[in-house]
Amino acid sequence: MGEMIEFLVGAALIGSGATAVIDGWAVLRAHVLGIPSLDYGLLGRWLILLARGQYRHLKIAAPDPAPRERLIGWAAHYLIGIAFAAVLLAIWGLDWLHSPRVGPALIVGIGSVAAPS
């Protein structure tokens, strides 16, 4: 397999897998602790409004729902996870894919939590 294909497949598998684990944790947390999960429809709404040229919102939940905002939000959620996995592989290389270590994954994972701040 070519290096670029290996990089893309690796990023897609790692990113979507890590995102699925986060989503599973959110479901468990909601059922056990009663902590509601994030509404990725709002992410989709924000992206749709951003594409329409609206850059600021007092409350993103205030505008009327946009068509397909939930689908767009969930797709963006997983694409962002894949992008963070691509960062991991871009920094530590395909060697990390063949012999993963926890340190680099934790660094990128912590960075992914700090990034929206």
Image (cartoon, rainbow, N blue to C red):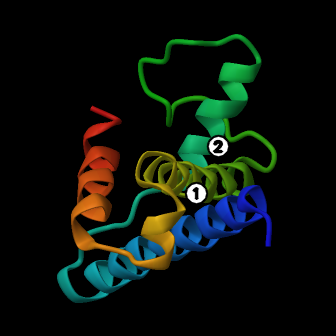
Q: Which residue is mark 2?
A: 44
**In the image, residue 41 above or below residue 12:** above
Q: Residue at x 68, y 56 (%)?
A: 75
How busy is the neighbourhood of tag 1: few (under 14 within 10 Å), some, or many (20 plus)?
many
How busy is the neighbourhood of tag 2: few (under 14 within 10 Å), some, or many (20 plus)?
many
- Residue 53 is situated, as x and y percent measured from the top left of the image, at 71, 11
Q: Residue at x 68, y 41 (%)?
A: 65
Which badge, 1 or 2, is on the more N-terminal residue?
A: 2
Q: Answer yes or no: do the residues labelled 1 and 2 have beta carbons within 8 Å?
A: no
**In the image, residue 17 above or below residue 67:** below
- Residue 107 is situated, as x and y percent measured from the top left of the image, at 24, 53
Q: Nearer the viewer, mark 1 or mark 2?
A: 1
Q: Residue at x 33, y 79 (%)?
A: 25
Mark 1 lies on a secondary structure that is helix
Q: Amino acid at mark 1?
A: Ile
Mark 2 lies on a secondary structure that is helix
**In the image, residue 102 above or below residue 57:** below
Instruction: Give the alpha-carbon distance from disc 1 to disc 2, as whole Å.
Output: 17 Å
In the drawing, does residue 81 fall left or right of residue 45?
Answer: left
- What is the quadrant of residue 21 in the picture? bottom left
- What is the quadrant of residue 7 in the picture? bottom right
**In the image, residue 103 above or below residue 47:** below
Q: Amino acid at mark 2?
A: Gly
Q: Which residue is mark 1?
A: 82
